[in-house]
Image (tube, rainbow, N blue to C red):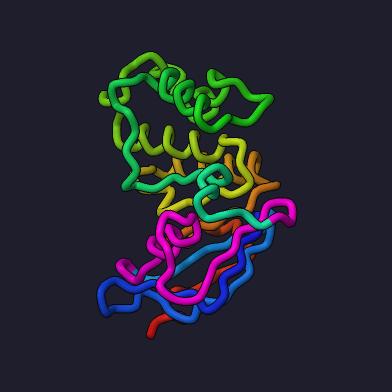
Amino acid sequence: MRITCSDAGKRFNREWIFRRFSYDFLAAHKYAITGPNGSGKSTLLQVLSSSMAVNAGKIEWYDDGNIKEPESIFQYFSLAAPYLDIIEEMTALEFLRFHNQFKQLMTGTSIKEIIYLIGLEKAADKQIRYYSSGMKQRLKLAQAIFSDVPLLLLDEPCTNLDAAGYELYNHLVQTFCNYKTIIVSSNDPAEYSFCDHRISIMDYKQ
């Protein structure tokens, strides 16, 4: 998936979060959006997902060279972010099966294999509400990384992960996401070390 931004700007009330943002996100490339906490990284990521509309300029999405309408973009991306909730009354198996009904997981890897890959095989039949914060984050990453979509959006993807979790995250991205366009919002270099391009949100302030 390719995303083209032309003089895009987003504001809340009278405050511009970013402005005059022109950038071309190319298919199968890896991008990092960097900047201090509260600088607008997550807002830009949500605009790129079409979850928020811009107040200035325009954004266009292309899949296989065909332009897509903003209201259809949800079909083409997956997102992992600390502010996204998961259904804690479900088990990990149930959650991924439920997710698969709405956004298919990659072919060639079963749900049980995915759970094994993220190290949750011993807790696969436990309700998610009994998971630690790190275990929940591993599950969020799994549903995003293994979704069969061309665009992967990651907002502070290693929140609540320990050193082993960071290593797992980087392994999963580099093993299973080579064909995807990836955009990471983070101020932690360990979360975007694999990215080819870095974009500082501070360059697009008023």
Q: Quadrant of residue 84?
A: top left
In the image, taking residue 199 as reference, residue 67 lies left or right, namely right
Residue 81 visible to the viewer: yes
The x, y position of residue 2, in whole percent, is 65, 59
Whole-percent x, y for residue 55 in the image: 40, 73
Q: Is residue 13 above or below residue 127?
A: below
- Residue at image position (50%, 60%) is 48
Q: Residue furthest right?
A: 65
77 or 132: nearer the eye? Answer: 77
Most extreme residue toward the bottom, as rendered?
206
User: x and y percent of residue 98 in the render?
Assistant: 45, 23
Residue at image x 31%, y 47%?
83
Nearest the viewer among 36 and 144 is: 144
Q: Quadrant of the C terminus?
A: bottom left
Position above or below: 15 against 138: below
Query: Which residue: 60% across, 20% down?
Result: 110
User: Which residue reaches farthest top?
Assistant: 125
- Say which residue appears at 39% left-offset and 60% top-offset: 42
Residue 190 lies in the magenta-colored region: no
Q: Which residues are magenta?
A: 37-66
Which of the pair 54/86 is nearer the observer?
A: 54
The answer to whether residue 7 is above or below residue 138 is below
Q: Disc count in the image? A: 0
Q: Is residue 187 visible?
A: no
Q: Position of residue 142 (x, y in %)?
A: 49, 34
Q: Determine if the magenta segment contains residue 39.
A: yes
Q: Relative to 77, is 1 on the left or the right?
A: right
The image quarter containing residue 107 is: top right
